[in-house]
Amino acid sequence: MCEFCTQHGEGEKWYLTMENYSKDLLDQNKRRKYAVEFINGFDKRVPKSIKQLDKIRKTPMMKLARPVLTHMQKEDHYGQVVPMEDVEKVFDMVQGAVRLPCVCRRVTTGNMNARYCYGLTMDRQLMDSLDDSFSLELLTKEEALEAIRKLDKEGLVHSVWTFRTPFIGGLCNCDQDCMAYRITHARGDYPVMFRAEWVAQVSADDCNGCRLCMRQCQYGAVRYSSSTKKVIIDPTACYGCGVCRASCKKDAISLSPRAEVRAAANLW
């Protein structure tokens, strides 16, 4: 069981604990102020932080800095990958969502209106404090889920994010343009998000070896065997996002609890 489950989830998946989305939690610990400053200042703050990180990432100091940076991230703004099934459960606990441009993509692509992010439990005071360039969209639960399902088919990875843990204020849809993906996976600097509590698995009987799922996977976890003409999924590389399933025309891919797969395989 992950540390967030133990500390914030009462024995369940921590992101499925309704209290973690509550307005009462938002009102505590200056979270609203933190969220506003985080969102409004992201595109100015992050490039400077990356330059500082680049200076130490190839030095012995990085080994010492990594656990400190991870600890700080977990305290303030940390994420976890969630499959579409859990996204739907999250929206059962909130009234709706506020869609806004992705702050990561403002930095990585220069696109100021890439609308992949969804604010959860954003009250009027918080929304009115955001920069006008975000031009917020209020969506119903149904509208938000319909939009996110389309992103799922496109291959974007869903993730929930804290603003002063354990308050969960956002649901993002990530690919290689996401700063968290780059820092955690592409650059390998230090973990900014947890893997999902799930692992994807392939039914050898149903797989036809088309390899469409390989193109969908953001993490390189899907491997092809020329001898069997089938694909397999490396559980140690899989993030459990489940987006590989959307491309499979044979419904050969399913998700299993990570803890069960780990115990059965005894690999990691």
Image (cartoon, grey):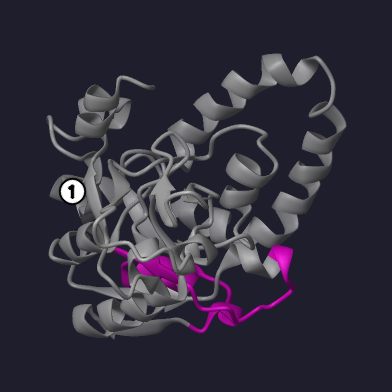
Q: Which region shows up in magenta?
A: 107-135
The residue closer to the viewer here, 59 or 246, is: 246
For residue 95, side relative to residue 230 (left or right): left
For residue 148, side relative to residue 102 (left or right): left
Q: Is residue 26 above or below residue 245?
A: above
For residue 105, side relative to residue 117 (left or right): right
Residue 3 x/y as whole percent: 31, 25
What element does badge 1 sit on? helix
Residue 182 x/y as whole percent: 65, 49
The residue lying at 70 percent from left, 61 percent from top is: 43
Residue 87 forms part of the magenta stretch: no
What residue is disc 1 on? 16
Residue 45 x/y as whole percent: 71, 51
The residue closer to the viewer here, 123 or 81, is: 81
Image quadrant holding the C terminus, namely top left
Callout 1 crowding tier (Cα within 10 Å): few <14, some 14–19, many ≥20: many
Residue 134 forms part of the magenta stretch: yes
The residue closer to the viewer here, 180 or 76, is: 180
The residue lying at 41 percent from left, 46 percent from top is: 233
Q: Is residue 245 above or below residue 179?
A: below
